[in-house]
Image (cartoon, rainbow, N blue to C red):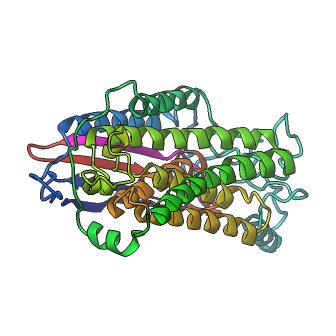
Amino acid sequence: MQGVVDFREVVAMTDRRNQRQVISAAGKLSRFAGLLGSRGTPRRPPLGAWLVASTILSSWALWLNAAGADEPPAPVPGAPTPSGAPSPSRPATTAPATTAAATPTSQSADDSAQDYEFQSGIRCPYCVPTPEYPQGRFGLHWHDRWRRVGWAEYVSTPLLFGTSLLFSTSVLPAPKSANWTGPILFDSAARSSLEFKSRTARKNADTVSTVLMYTSLAQNLLVDNLVATMIVRNNPDVAWQMGVINAQSYGLTLAVSGVVKHFVARERPYGDQCGSPTSEFSCTTKERYRSFFSGHASLTATSTGLVCAHHTHLNLYGDDLADGTACVSSALIAVSTSVLRIASENHWASDVIVGDLVGFASGYFLPTLVYYKKLRVLPAQDHPTYQPHIAILPMFGPDSVQIGAGGDF
């Protein structure tokens, strides 16, 4: 399979107080060609797969841009603040009596803000006092500048899971033949290097990969969401925000995986053994033609993205080393799952790599860009907050399908 991916920076706008970079990335997926199957004429995925994928991408683009509709517009740098109102970019502070005295006080406040990690006894420097919290916010909480879940999530998440069930169950007839057979690129080399030769070893690898997938789900949903946030940190609001975001990311991964598996209909690596009377694989089930892309790999990668995103922005464990360890351990689970899916003859290497990329994008970049709004924990001190805008749209050419992505964040 041949593909050309071009990433281009379109515009960079800078002024004295804030800097925004508008990035436009365009990825071009050329025609499927050279899919050298293990037998017969090379086959390519049908146009129906691209049409359904385009519908999902278009709907997601509209939702992403509508997600910021309830957010006020970004303040113009240098614009006067209404009398008595705190600046939206930082908490209100008492004006110093003299310029000379302001320097050390301002520097101390900035240093304190940079060190803020949701400590229980320190007021949040990024959230202004409100009637509900007249003394400000302390401990673990959802920052005022972060997007909160709402009707868009409550509607889109069930639709995503519904799409997944539609294409993953017997509601739709499963493909009776493969649209894509055989290895590409480094698939053969990876298979020969990682494949377990023993039937028992392959079966055990299949079982262990499934256990690891559920372990990654438990780490995110039970340990982080329920135990650490709801019980230990005693914050049901943050737990709810995390829970809905988690469900949305998992739903997106499952929906895309179900649609792609159904229309691409790639034969699994063990397909070349289905003619053998001693084959231990289930060659008559619909799973035979659902190799691309790996569901196990995409789900564990989604968990990894979510764990890293939440721990990076919320400091759930209250310790940098502990939060970093949670992210790394989740990533190791994802890598191990991907390797075992190849070793058990369930997937080609290209299946798990694409699954990892799709899953991590859904688990990390969706929450980070849409809800946390930053690829870092704290914004620059002189930068006002603003609502990022992201768009992902399909573009069709005579002989190709292009996917364009752009936004400012």
Q: Is residue 294 left or right of residue 332?
A: left
- Relative to residue 62, is residue 101 depicted above or below? below
The residue lying toward the viewer, choosing from 237 and 356, is: 356
Residue 213, position as x, y percentages in the image: 57, 53
- Relative to residue 328, is residue 246 depicted above or below? above
Q: Quadrant of residue 74?
A: top right
Question: Residue drawn 77% across and 45% down?
Answer: 226
Q: Is residue 253 left or right of residue 26?
A: right
Residue 334 on the magenta span: no
- Residue 85 in view of the camera: no
| Residue span colored magenta | 383-395
Residue 106, position as x, y percentages in the image: 77, 68
The residue lying toward the viewer, choosing from 111 and 366, is: 366
Question: Residue drawn 82% across and 69% down?
Answer: 105
Question: Residue drawn 35% across and 26% down?
Answer: 172
Residue 72, position as x, y percentages in the image: 58, 36
Q: Is residue 366 left or right of residue 272?
A: right
- Residue 342 in view of the camera: yes
State the quadrant of the N terminus: bottom left
The residue lying toward the viewer, choosing from 318 and 68, is: 318
